[in-house]
Image (cartoon, helix red, strand yellow):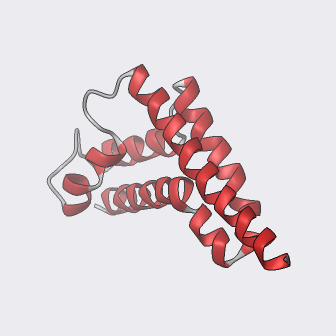
Amino acid sequence: MLNLVVADLIVLLHFSYILFVVFGGLLVLKWRRVAWGHIPCVIWGVAIEFTGWICPLTPIENILRYSGGSGGYSNSFIEHYLLPVIYPTGLTRELQLLMGVAVIAINVVIYTAYYFMKVRQKH
């Protein structure tokens, strides 16, 4: 049972990390130093999408589920609502590449806005 709870916590961590990769630049608008952690996370997230690698959290989660006696996902809230977002069905290589490009585009827009806000403040 504990392994399944830890696996659910890893799913939450995984989902939080994805949100941070995509939207963490918004935190930079308020706290500039967040960029030091956010930019490497974006690079990692985009690398995962572009290369087709598997995030290290995924096998850890699966090991915990199997060792907890779950052959697959049960119907908990986390599994029902978050897992399809993290692991969408029909995920193709083209969709992964598109997601990587979307992450880059979103963050370029956010960091560009940040840059122009800072330049505007200096004038």
Q: Residue furthest right?
A: 122
Up/down of 22 relative to 51, above or below: below
What residue is shown at x 31% (from left), y 56% (from top)? 4
Q: Position of residue 38 (x, y in %)?
A: 67, 58
Count up the numbered dots.
Answer: 0
Q: Quadrant of residue 92?
A: top left
What residue is shown at x 39% (from left), y 48% (from top)? 64
Up/down of 121 relative to 92, above or below: below
Up/down of 34 relative to 100, above or below: below
What residue is shown at x 56% (from left), y 44% (from top)? 105
Q: Quadrant of residue 72?
A: top left
What residue is shown at x 35% (from left), y 45% (from top)? 67
Q: Residue furthest left?
A: 75
Front-most of residues 120 and 13: 120
Q: Residue furthest front?
A: 123
Q: Is residue 111 left or right of residue 63?
A: right
The quarter of the image holding the N terminus is bottom left
The quarter of the image holding the C terminus is bottom right
